[in-house]
Every structure is written in C-alpha cells, then in structure tokens.
C-alpha cells in the first residue's frame, strides 16, 4: 500500500549523475554520486535505518555513473570512468574504513561500468569498449590484483546489466545494434562464456536484471528476470526459471601452521622467521602469544601492505589498524614472525592461521 511509504525526504547534495546505493555489513546504507565538481561524493547512515552523515567528497574526475560493490575486505569499492576514458577505482580495506585513493585499471570505456561479485568474493567489472564490444576485467583472487581487460565480443548500444545465474556463473545482458536484447553467460563460476544469444524484443533503454530464488509447489526455483523500455514507452520483462542447482560442497577450511625457526637476528631487537603459505581470507589466529612481540602477514596488493598482529590484554590488535584484527582480512600468503620475549628465542615457534573456505 502507498500509505506504507514514508514520503520523500531531502538528503541534499548537488548531483550530476544517477545515485548508486550499497549496503554495508552492519545494515547501513551508503549512497554515491557525481557532484557538480565531477568528483565522487558519498553519504551514509550512522546506524541501520538511522540518520545520515552528511555529504563527504572522495575526489576523482568522473565522466560516468558509479558502480559499487562489497569487496573481500568487507569494505566498499567504487568504479568509474575517468576523464581519460579509463576505469578508475577506490576502495576501503574494512567496513567503514579509510578510502584508498584513486587507482587506474586502464581500458577504453564508452559506457558506465558494471561490477559483479563472484561466489569466491572476486570482483569483476564489465564495460563497453571503443569497438562497441563487451570487455571485462577480473580480480585474480579476493582483494587481489587484476587480470587485465579481455574482450567478450558483441555489438553493444547500451550499458551492461549483470547478474549471477543458476549455475553460479555470471550472465551479461545488453541491447544490440538491432535493438534486441542479447545475453552471454557462464555455466559455472569463472567458466567459459557461451557467446552472444538473442532474446528478441525491441528495447529503447538500458536493460535491468535481477536474480532471486523462490518456492513454487514445494520446489525451490531460481529466476533470472530482465526488464527494459519498449518502443511504446511501456515496461517489458522476460524471465528464465530453473530448479535451484545443488551447490558445490564447500572446501574444508585451510589451516596454515607457521613454524618459524631461529634464523636472523635483527640488530638490537629480535629473532625473525619468514615463510610463504596459501593466500586467502583469514578466519582465526591461534597461539599468537608465543611470539610475545608480533606476527606479520601481507595483503595481495601491489605494492603490498604488511599487517602486524600484536597480542594486547588477550586481544589481537593490528597495524595498520583493522577493527576485526586479522579476521576477515586477505593474506597474500607471506608471513613473518618476530620474537620479543625475555631470554633467548626458542628453537622454533608455531602459530596456526585458519583460512575461510
């Protein structure tokens, strides 16, 4: 019912783009826009369903609408077309964390960017290139480096709509040169793309798409549904329904046991050990107290940032600061242990880092 809605309320600002909204892990909403200065501006709720912060600038020189997704750090990551027609992004390394500053990802964009999140937490960005084909750029690992631009063909005359399909792959929808709707899909996560297939129609807008599950006659169903404006100005939709696919059994969590031998002595300080292990999202750290001083790991950025975990009053603290300690952070698989206890360092020390599946 109409009466269930609040009525319009102003949030201020000076917008020169469509707004983009994202949901943080704690349930607060955050809105991103291009301002009159062509910079990115954002405003967020100070509590779930609560009041708003007021507008804050994030800089940049935008020539597109904004795409935003949640990254593997549980922060938000924004993507835009810059004044050089390349893709640029800015991100947080924790929920409500400090923003990174703008970084280029190259490419030659002639559309707004669209971002999708794969089941493994990697981000994937889709754009129309200068050749009017679809191009995409994928993170090699969650919060990791980027693969570089790869073409997916087609002749696009619209922005791109992307959703996750029943096969746990991504599916892209565009308007073709004949004004019909076309789609290109993966049959599994990070799978091979099918090639473009027509879905007919005569559309006069960018397509929009949603994917969702529902129950019908006691059977769980998955539906992918696309929407567009027709030649008569009316809204049209087309959908595809399949039984929910059985998910692939999740892998068991990995446990990295760090056994750091007495190796090098840092002058005036401590003995150090270093080793490499598998990268991934950290779930927990055990036996940190053995190290007495700190245990370090690197993220998978370039250049990398080293995070030091210290045990203070029984609680793990990190530098640079991360509210959850190491939990939820991505490790690039390189670790160092430093001993600052009284007396000589034991021959070896061990700590267990459990990675999420």
Image: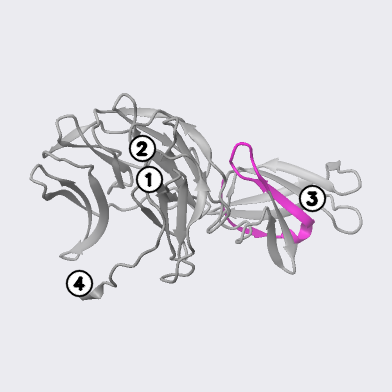
Q: Residue under circle 2?
A: 126
Cα separation, mark 4 vs mark 1, equals: 32 Å
Q: Secondary structure at mark 1?
A: strand
- Residue in the picture at 65% in, 58% down: 285
What quarter of the picture does the N terminus occupy?
Answer: bottom left
The vertical placement of 54 against 138, above or below, is below
Q: Residue 140 in the image: x percent, y percent?
A: 49, 37
Cα separation, mark 3 vs mark 4, equals: 62 Å
Residue count near mark 3 (Cα–Cα under 10 Å), binned few <14, some 14–19, many ≥20: many
The vertical placement of 24 against 139, above or below, is below
Which circle's residue, 4 or 1, is located before the other in the chain? 4
Q: Residue under circle 3?
A: 338
Cα separation, mark 2 vs mark 4, equals: 36 Å
- Residue in the picture at 35% in, 47% down: 17
Q: Residue under circle 1?
A: 116
Disc number for residue 2: 4
Task: Pick out the residue farthest to the left.
Answer: 232
The vertical placement of 294 against 278, above or below, is below
């Amino acid at each position: 019912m109409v009466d269930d809605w609040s009525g319009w309320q102003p949030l201020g600002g000076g917008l020169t783009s469509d707004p983009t909204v994202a949901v943080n892990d704690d349930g607060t909403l955050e809105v991103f826009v291009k301002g009159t200065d062509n910079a990115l501006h954002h405003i967020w709720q100070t509590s779930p369903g609560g009041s708003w912060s007021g507008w804050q600038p994030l800089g940049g020189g935008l020539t597109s609408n904004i795409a935003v997704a949640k990254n593997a750090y549980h922060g938000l990551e924004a993507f835009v077309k810059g004044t050089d027609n390349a893709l640029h992004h800015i991100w947080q390394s924790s929920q409500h964390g400090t923003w990174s500053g703008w970084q280029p990802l190259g490419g030659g964009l002639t559309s707004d960017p669209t971002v999708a999140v794969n089941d493994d937490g990697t981000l994937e960005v889709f754009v129309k290139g200068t050749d009017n084909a679809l191009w995409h750029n994928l993170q090699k690992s969650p919060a990791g480096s980027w693969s570089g631009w790869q073409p997916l063909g087609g002749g696009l005359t619209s922005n791109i709509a992307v959703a996750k399909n029943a096969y746990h792959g991504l599916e892209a929808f565009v308007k073709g040169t004949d004004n019909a709707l076309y789609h290109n899909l993966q049959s599994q996560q990070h799978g091979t793309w099918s090639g473009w297939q027509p879905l007919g129609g005569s559309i006069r807008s960018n397509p929009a798409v949603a994917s969702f599950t529902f129950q019908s006659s006691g059977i769980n169903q998955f539906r992918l549904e696309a929407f567009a404006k027709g030649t008569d100005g009316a809204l049209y939709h087309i959908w595809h329904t399949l039984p929910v696919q059985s998910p692939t059994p999740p892998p068991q969590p990995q446990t990295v046991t760090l056994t750091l031998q007495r190796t090098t002595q840092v002058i005036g300080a401590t003995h150090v050990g270093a080793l490499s292990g598998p990268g991934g999202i950290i779930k927990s750290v055990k036996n940190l107290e053995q190290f007495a001083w700190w245990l370090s790991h690197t993220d998978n950025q370039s250049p990398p940032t080293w995070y030091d975990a210290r045990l203070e009053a029984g609680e793990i603290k990190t530098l640079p600061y991360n509210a959850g300690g190491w939990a939820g952070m991505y490790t690039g698989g390189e670790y160092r242990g430093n001993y600052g206890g009284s007396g000589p360092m034991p021959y070896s020390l061990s700590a267990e880092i459990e990675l999420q599946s």
